[in-house]
Amino acid sequence: MPETTTTALDKEQLRELVADVLDLDVAEVTDDADFMEDLDVDSLMALEITVRLEKEYGVRLAEAELTSITSLQGTYELLTSKLGDTR
């Protein structure tokens, strides 16, 4: 029987990844906290988040999709959509 691997998207794991990149406590990364305004994310941090997301979840994010990565919820919704498209 062939083995299939699926990358299930767990919001708490995503929260931990973002908190790790931003060197923040996990509790600070709320679902609706704006990365730039509330969490002081600059363009280099945003790029690092994007790279980690692509590596962790095996997705390729188009430049136009990067505007969705402004909060944990927006990022979660984008990744859910991307992972759903690849299955």
Image: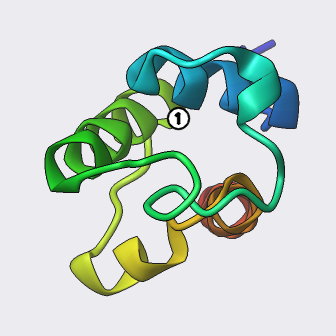
At 68% across and 68% down in the image, what residue appears? 74
Q: Nearer the viewer, residue 82 or 64?
A: 64
Task: In the rendered view, tell whether residue 11 sits above or below residue 85.
Answer: above
Give the residue type at disc 1: Tyr
Task: In the rendered view, tell whether residue 46 sits above or below residue 37.
Answer: above
Q: Is residue 70 left or right of residue 50?
A: right
Task: Name the residue at the left extreme.
Answer: 44
Measured as percent of width and height from the top left, residue 80 is found at 74, 59
Name the quadrant containing residue 12: top right
Task: In the rendered view, tell whether residue 82 sits above or below residue 2.
Answer: below
Measured as percent of width and height from the top left, residue 53 is found at 44, 38
At 80% across and 33% down in the image, what residue appears? 8
Q: Is residue 61 left or right of residue 42?
A: right
Q: Quadrant of the N terminus?
A: top right
Task: Name the residue at the bottom extreme.
Answer: 64
Q: How many marks?
A: 1
Q: Is residue 20 left or right of residue 51?
A: right
Q: Quadrant of the C terminus?
A: bottom right
At 36% across and 30% down in the image, what residue appears? 52
Helix, strand or loop status at disc 1: helix
Q: How is the image coloured?
A: rainbow
Name the quadrant containing residue 51: top left
- Crowdedness near tag 1: few (<14), some (14–19) or many (≥20) residues, C-alpha within 10 Å: some
At 41% across and 48% down in the image, what residue appears? 40
Q: Which residue is mark 1?
A: 57
Measured as percent of width and height from the top left, residue 29 is found at 71, 37
Task: Look at the image and tell me whether residue 4 can be seen.
Answer: no
